[in-house]
Image: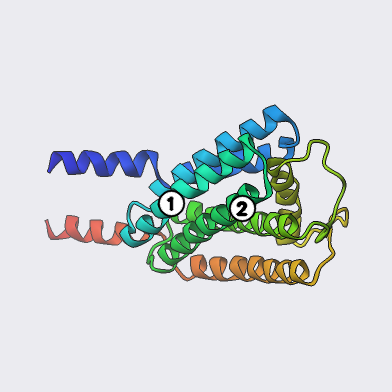
Amino acid sequence: MRHRQAVHFFRRRWFSFASLLATLLGLILAAGFAGSRPGALLVSLLFSLVLLAGVFSLYRQRGWRVVALALFGPALAAWWGALVRPGEGLEVLASLCAALFLGAVAAALLVFILRQGEATRDLVYGGICVYLLLGLLWAQLYALAETLAPGSLRMPPLDHPGHSALVGQLTYFSFITLTTLGYGDITPASPAVRSLVVVETLVGQMFIAVFIARLVGMPLATGVRRPSTSRREETQ
């Protein structure tokens, strides 16, 4: 019993949504430096941490955890393979596996959020994680489209061509699209990418609306527990 409680506390303390959020923010901030060799290595290390934190964040959802574990190995191997030995085949596999993993984790966290009955700090962290995962997911989809059909996006030439540099630049494009900011320095040039842009914009705005509405409709965890505590004191 004590062992189970210790394991539960360890997982909850170190592999909560806050841990995933920290790694996601680190990866997004480092993506802008992926054009250099040291930057690409840093992005790869942070991406590996995101994969690991994503798996552990699903410890309460066994089914989704199995899916994430099944995608963890291929995503990690393909990403590092594309870094060490660049090639179109590995780059396509890296973006595809990464997109599947990020999509699975985002879907699992969204299901978890919708099933909760109280607004907690962990729930807010989870919602932010889903939003950031959506941005990273679409970055991989854009990279996949550009790798399969070069010229699908009009963008400045990369200083140091490579999969990490491409994903880093398209991470920037993905988040300015997700937030409907759009500077115009990168634009879609193919019908498939235009469709991806439209879907990302709609999904991003709809998620914000649904998530905020869900939080507003939830009672605060502290607000629910206090009355029960006072009632127990009165009965005693």
Q: Secondary structure at mark 2?
A: helix
Residue 128 in sight:
no
Identified by mark 2, the residue type is: Ser
Measured as percent of width and height from the top left, residue 61 is found at 34, 59
Measured as percent of width and height from the top left, residue 35 is found at 75, 36
Q: Which mark is residue 75?
A: none
Residue at (21, 61) in percent of width and height: 231
Q: For the N terminus, which image quadrant?
A: top left
Mark 1 closeness class: few <14, some 14–19, many ≥20 residues within 10 Å = some
Figure disc tally: 2
Residue at (67, 44) in percent of width and height: 87
Q: Earlier in the sequence, mark 2 or mark 1?
A: 2
134 with respect to 146 (left or right): left
* Quadrant housing residue 151: bottom right
Instruction: Name the front one of labels 2 and 1.
Output: 2
* Front residue of 125 and 131: 131
How was this image coloured? rainbow
Q: Which residue is mark 1?
A: 122
